[in-house]
Image (cartoon, helix red, strand yellow):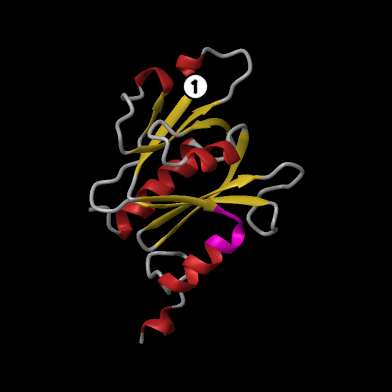
């Protein structure tokens, strides 16, 4: 099971490898087709871990996608008991399985697709929405002591 510290580790890795890049997105299992279509071709602008949930923020057409305005698409991931979200060069990406909800491959001009970075999500929950999705989940989850902005007075 992916616990909170594991989700924070994935978020840190994704910030280093994926943030600021533009991706083509698909849903190999077909269970996240609308979400994949919504983010495909867009730039990943922000990544947050909160409790056992990971949030990716994608720019919207005409928006900055920094997560501070309504011009953002948020993808919420809850890994469940055995979820994962590995990153690798596209040529090394493992085959999709029936639980692969989302696959992203970096869009690069002039580069070979095998050199592009890619990732795929196997998770219990993978959903998308606007900034309100993140705000609602953050409120429902409560304070996260692993976050830098944690309010430790709320844990007393």
Q: Where is residue 143 in the image (x, y as percent from the top left)?
A: 42, 73
Prevalent SS, magenta region: helix
Foreground pick, 141 / 36: 36
The percent position of residue 70, horizontal first and vertical second, equals: 69, 57
Q: Which of 139 and 10 is in front in this view?
A: 139
Q: Where is residue 21 in the image (x, y as percent from the top left)?
A: 58, 34
Query: Which image quadrant for residue 98?
Result: top left
| For residue 84, above or below residue 98 | below
Residue 149 visible from this viewpoint? no
Q: From what the image shows, is residue 47 above or below residue 26? A: below
For label 1, the SS is loop
Q: Which residue is drawn at 41% across and 79% down?
A: 152
Name the residue rendered at 35%, 20% in the picture. 92
Determine if the magenta segment contains residue 65: no
- Asked whether, in this view, residue 69 is left or right of residue 56, the answer is right
Q: Give the range drawn in magenta.
A: 129-133
Q: Quadrant for the C terminus, please.
A: bottom left
> Is residue 40 something one can see in this rendering?
yes
Front-most of residues 84 and 33: 33
Work out whether 156 lies above or below 133.
Answer: below
Is 67 displayed left or right of 99 in the figure?
A: right
Residue placed under numbered mark 1 in the picture? 116
Q: Which residue lies furthest to the bottom in this view?
A: 156
As drawn, 89 above or below 110: below
| Residue found 43% across the figure and 64% down from its top | 147
Residue 23 position, x and y percent, is 56, 31
Taking the spot 31% from the left edge, 24% from the top edge, the residue there is 95
């Amino acid at each position: 099971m992916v616990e909170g510290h594991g989700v924070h580790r994935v978020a840190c890795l994704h910030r280093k490898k994926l943030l600021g890049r533009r991706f083509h997105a698909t849903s190999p299992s077909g269970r996240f087709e609308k979400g994949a279509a919504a983010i495909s071709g867009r730039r990943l602008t922000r990544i947050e871990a909160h409790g056992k949930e990971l949030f990716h923020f994608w720019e919207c057409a005409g928006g900055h996608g920094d997560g501070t305005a309504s011009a953002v698409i948020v993808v919420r991931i809850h890994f469940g008991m055995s979820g994962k979200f590995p990153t690798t060069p596209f040529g090394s990406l493992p085959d999709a399985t029936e639980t692969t909800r989302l696959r992203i491959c970096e869009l690069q001009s002039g580069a070979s697709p095998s050199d592009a970075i890619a990732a795929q999500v196997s998770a219990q929950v993978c959903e998308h929405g606007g900034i309100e999705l993140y705000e609602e989940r953050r409120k429902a989850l409560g304070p996260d002591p692993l976050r830098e902005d944690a309010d430790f007075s709320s844990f007393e």
